[in-house]
Image (tube, helix red, strand yellow):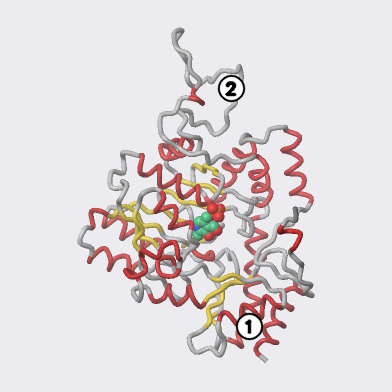
Amino acid sequence: MKLISDTIKEVPVKRRISVGDFQFGAEERAAINEVLDAGRLSEWKKVNEFERLFADYINTKHCVAVNSGTSALIVGLSALIYDSRFPKVRKGSKVITTPLTYVATINAIVLTGLEPVFVDVDPNNFSILPQKIEEHLKNADDPENYSIILPVHLMGYPCDMDEIKRIAEEYDLIVLEDSAQAHGSLYKGQKTGSLSLLSIFSFYIAHNIQAGEMGAVVTDDEKLTSLMRKLKANGRMCDCPVCTRPNGYCPYFPQDEDEDYDPRFVHDVIGYNFKIMEFEAALGVSQLKKADFIFEKRQNNVRFLNERLDKYSDDLQLPAFSKDVSYLAYPIVIKEHSKFTRKYLREELEKNGIENRPLFGCVPTQQPAYKYLQVKYEGKIPNAEYIGKNAFYIGCHQYLNQDDLEYVVSIFEKIFS
Ligand SMILES: Cc1ncc(COP(=O)(O)O)c(C=O)c1O
């Protein structure tokens, strides 16, 4: 039988500028070998090491690692629903969020039984607009049915968290940050992900700190941490970050003579299996150790591309530069009166080996899975709709060298000439 992969022909291009990359250097190979030498695949010491290092990096007390950013959203939202301290967060309650995000944000809201409600974004940095959140809540017939504000720091740009938190306080709402695309971004000197009750991250390949597949929730809250540890492991009653069992028995659940149970197989909440492999955590640790370098290199690449592509600013809105942004990629919005369409520009770049992707689309009006929301939102969130149709991104990652950057500039020159 012929495999589809055998029929795919590599198109020879002079150079390939990928959106993201992962290169196995000496540190990454050593990380994998460490796991092989330790001899355990399922989650253990490396996962715990990653959790401790990542919590320190973001400056939160706790980190719970899970198998993806999507799982992190589901486990975080589920914990809020389970926790009796937050009675407003119940199935069917409403979550105010951004329409311009990778679809996982909205899928997680819907799959946990919550209802997404969308307000528009800032056209310059793609972030949810606090004044639109406030306007929406002021005019809502049922403000008591709202439970969460879920901002997304898209492409690394921090949302206006002071304003979001002020509104949340006024309306008694929880804030959960989706910081999947913003590893190390700063808002008024503090890392995104440390600015609300709980926050999620994704370490999917091509994100700034990457592990292949992996996610995490960070928080200062001990009870939520315990709940999330249970929920990610099918709701088991124990919540240790690493299960050691020095004598073969769990020291934390002492049993009377007539009792006979194993806390790993007694389940007191209904949960998922979102556990991870040691390999992923080991790769995550290796990247976390390079976080400052990655942050700086990506910023330098964005700064360089901005300087050299600025001459096309009649047609292109280039990414606003800030020393506080940890750039996931290099987003470009085609301006309204541009001589180019996004389709044309994306195709020309791809033909020349520059990989690119659309900026996700406006979820309620442009994603087929959410067709049922189209009539309700069409024309009501114009910035997100415009960006969803007219923006795309190319790579700015840490493996690009000066020649690669010059090549990208030369291809834009060719297209515009
Ligand atoms: C904003 C946002 N949220 C959530 C996710 C989901 O993360 P994952 O792909 O690890 O499930 C992503 C993934 O890129 C994302 O960009």
Q: Amino acid at mark 1?
A: Leu
Instruction: Looking at the picture, tell me which residue is in the foreground, 196 or 111.
Output: 111
Residue 142, image quadrant: bottom left
Residue 382, image quadrant: bottom left
Label placed on residue 128: none
Q: Give the x, y percent position of residue 225.
A: 45, 39
Query: Does the Cβ of the disc 1 residue fall within 8 Å of ligand 1?
Result: no
Q: Give the x, y percent position of residue 256.
A: 44, 10
Check the image and report above or below for 416 versus 368: below
Instruction: Looking at the picture, tell me which residue is in the foreground, 310 or 261.
Output: 261
Label placed on residue 245: 2
Q: Which residue is mark 1?
A: 309
Instruction: Looking at the picture, tell me which residue is in the foreground, 147 or 219.
Output: 147
Instruction: Please identify the residue farthest to the left as the structure is shown.
Output: 141
Check the image and report above or below for 165 versus 302: above
Residue at 76% in and 41% down:
33
Residue 159, image quadrant: bottom left
375 vs 416, left or right, is left
Residue at 53% in and 88% down:
338
